[in-house]
Image (tube, rainbow, N blue to C red):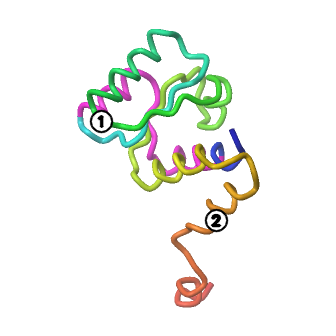
Amino acid sequence: MNNAFLTLLGFAQKAGKLVAGEDTVHIALKKRKVKLLIVAGDASDNTKDRANQWKASFNVELLDVLDKDTLSQAIGKSNRALIGVVDQGFATQMLKLNRAPETSESEDALVSESPLDADSMEKTGE
């Protein structure tokens, strides 16, 4: 997994667009807020099974990536094996970064699809 994915995960956490932990994720799924599930590669079999059931039941994408320590560190919380992304923009970008080859292209994708372009920066005076 690349640094761009971890950075985006941290941004999503800062923006309040993540829910973490099985109970919290399940509540958000029931409210149809979760757009993407992320489960740690070293999560328990029960957690992975539950995530796969939720993927089918709630029709959301599922990424099985990294490990609990790396995911937890990226979002600034301890011992998290399951994360729900509740923002479609963040979810879409994370899926793109996960599918991109491990090159600087994936980091370029993060920058190139930024909502601020040169024209909008000119208009705001930045």
Q: Residue furthest right?
A: 104
The image position of residue 62, as x and y in percent, is: 45, 33
Disc number placed over residue 59 in the picture, else none: 1
| Residue at image point 44% right, 56% down | 89
Mark 2: few/some/many CA within 10 Å (<14, 14-19, 20+): few
| Residue at image point 67% right, 50% down | 4
Magenta region: which residues? Answer: 7-30
The image position of residue 19, as x and y in percent, is: 43, 35
User: In the visual, does 9 lie left or right of 57?
Assistant: right
Q: Is residue 88 above or below residue 2?
A: below
Task: State yes or no: residue 43 in magenta.
Answer: no
The image position of residue 24, as x and y in percent, is: 37, 27
> Label 2 is placed on what type of residue?
Val
For the N terminus, the quadrant is top right
Q: Is residue 18 above or below residue 45?
A: below
Closer to viewer: mark 2 or mark 1: 1
| Residue occupied by mark 2 | 111
Looking at the rendering, which quadrant does residue 104 occupy?
A: bottom right
Secondary structure found at label 1: loop
> Label 1 is placed on what type of residue?
Asn
